[in-house]
Image: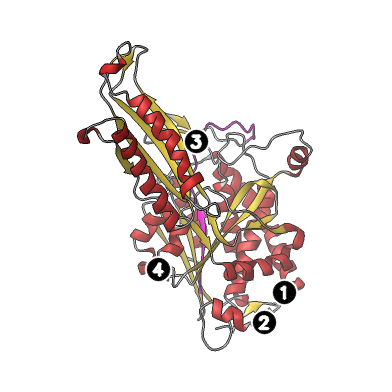
């Protein structure tokens, strides 16, 4: 079997938190090894695509991924992993020890969304379920988690086939409930870092609906946002719509709050610091001529740093109370502001760790397929795995483009619009996403666990 040639860097040794000799890394340009791994993925693709179609046709909602977890756990056992099911309710942890060395964790998420599929695929989901809302709905892998799982299995197969090229402990996890931002925390609270080897490095990918299929995008530093859900109950004194002077109208008060909230980002947050305060729902009243005694607002609040998050949340509470005082509401009728707990913390890609892996990806996939992309205000609870042990775990989540080439070209020519993630029409070029994901995850693990490395 071909062996990797490894290079060392004192600067990277410092960045990776090691002492003494620098950590070993795969030397750029080992084309023969890259070709061997790529050929292995290509050989596995028919089976991986069969798995993908099965996963796509049979999605399960958050914390209900029972059948999904079981079928993938069985595959991991067949590959020789020590497998534990039911971690964090429906999560799966698969461990393979292969000598002394670092511990690398590779993660895929499992849950689908309450979306009625409209892709027209021959294996489109016809599954229905009743989520917590109590309203029956279709279920779809509208966020591409089916490609994540298939790519994850592909990486596992290659890492087993290439065990003589890495040395250390491989921890592969299937995470539930990413779509509701609770699955990673559930696994951690169920002892992920106590019951199983704690990773030195955590790596994952997510398909992307804004890049051509098979391209890789990365964002050093903050990559995805803190996600807070905030409910504001605005109280008032109701009455007849014809006699507003006898009331304290909560609709007018809530409207003032909505408008004032917009100044948090524009006038209180630094122009160099991203933030979003969006009112997604405003509900009050039931009849034309009745002034209600209550209005309810639902907000999504996005930020990157803990300091910005606090500024925005504190500002929301202050503005709600201040506007109520200005409207003459007594203390007992002050608005009630509730911040959902737990929230999804921002995702931080360790910059030097990110650049180290991306340098390898550039050599492997080519400069034209690997690009730095802007951070986004979406959320990802992959962030929890680093946040649980920020001094010990370095993490990276990267994007793999999923837009089919013909659709990409049509969109660039202004002849078509692209569906987004969570759209009922999102149908990525699954073969390119899975092949790229499997190779990238396997290559990253091999590079992080060099034979004879520190």
Q: Residues within 10 Å of mark 1 (few under 14, many from 20)?
A: some
Q: Nearer the viewer, mark 2 or mark 4?
A: 2
Task: Look at mark 1 in the image and give the residue it sits on.
Answer: 28
**Secondary structure found at label 1:** loop
| Residue at image coords 70%, 53% | 214
| Residue at image coords 60%, 66% | 354
Task: Look at mark 2 in the image and give the residue it sits on.
Answer: 7
**Secondary structure found at label 4:** loop
Task: Look at mark 4 in the image and give the residue it sits on.
Answer: 196
Disc sitting over residue 139 in the figure: 3
| Residue at image coords 34%, 28% | 295
- Residue in the foreground of this view, choosing between 259 and 184: 259
> What range is drawn magenta here?
103-122
Q: Are marks 2 and 4 in contact (CB under 8 Å)?
A: no
Disc sitting over residue 39 in the figure: none
Q: Are marks 1 and 2 in contact (CB under 8 Å)?
A: yes
Judged by its main secondary structure, the magenta piece is loop
- Residue in the foreground of this view, choosing between 326 and 440: 326
First in residue order: circle 4 vs circle 3? 3
């Amino acid at each position: 079997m071909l062996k990797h040639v490894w290079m060392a860097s004192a600067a990277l040794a410092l960045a990776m938190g090691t002492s003494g000799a620098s950590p070993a890394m795969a030397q750029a340009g080992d084309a023969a090894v890259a070709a061997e791994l790529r050929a292995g993925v290509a050989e596995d693709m028919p089976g991986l695509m069969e798995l993908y179609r099965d996963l796509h046709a049979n999605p399960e909602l958050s914390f209900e991924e029972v059948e999904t977890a079981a079928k993938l756990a069985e595959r991991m056992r067949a590959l020789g992993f020590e497998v534990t099911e039911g971690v964090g309710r429906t999560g799966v942890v698969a461990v393979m020890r292969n000598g002394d060395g670092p511990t690398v964790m590779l993660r895929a998420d499992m849950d689908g969304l309450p979306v009625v599929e409209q892709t027209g695929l021959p294996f489109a989901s016809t599954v229905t379920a009743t989520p917590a809302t109590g309203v029956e709905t279709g279920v779809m892998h509208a966020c591409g988690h089916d490609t994540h799982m298939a790519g994850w299995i592909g990486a596992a197969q290659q890492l087993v086939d290439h065990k003589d090229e890495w040395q250390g402990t491989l921890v592969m996890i299937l995470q539930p409930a990413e779509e509701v931002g609770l699955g990673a925390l559930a696994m951690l609270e169920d002892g992920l870092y106590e019951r199983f080897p704690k990773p030195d490095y955590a790596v994952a990918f997510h398909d992307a609906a804004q890049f051509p299929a098979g391209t890789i995008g990365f964002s050093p530093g903050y990559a995805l946002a803190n996600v807070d859900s905030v409910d504001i109950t605005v109280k008032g004194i109701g009455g007849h719509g014809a006699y507003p002077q006898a009331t304290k109208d909560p609709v007018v008060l809530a409207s003032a709050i909505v408008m004032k909230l917009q100044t948090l980002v524009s006038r209180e947050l630094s122009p160099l610091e991203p933030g979003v305060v969006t009112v997604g729902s405003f509900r009050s009243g039931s009849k034309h001529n009745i002034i209600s005694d209550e209005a309810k607002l639902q907000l999504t609040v996005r930020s990157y740093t803990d300091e910005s998050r606090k500024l925005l949340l504190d500002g929301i509470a202050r503005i709600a109370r201040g506007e109520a005082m200005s409207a003459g509401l007594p203390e007992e009728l002050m608005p009630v502001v509730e911040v959902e707990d737990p929230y999804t913390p921002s995702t931080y890609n360790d910059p030097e760790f990110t650049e180290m892996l991306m340098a390898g990806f550039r050599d492997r996939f080519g400069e034209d397929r690997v690009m730095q992309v802007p951070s986004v205000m979406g959320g990802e609870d992959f962030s929890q795995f680093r946040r649980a042990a920020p001094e010990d775990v370095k993490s990276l989540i990267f994007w793999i483009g999923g837009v089919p080439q013909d659709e990409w070209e049509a969109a660039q020519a202004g002849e078509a619009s692209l569906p987004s993630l969570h759209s009922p029409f999102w149908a990525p070029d699954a073969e390119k996403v899975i092949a790229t994901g499997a190779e990238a995850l396997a290559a990253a693990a091999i590079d992080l666990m060099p034979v004879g490395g520190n």
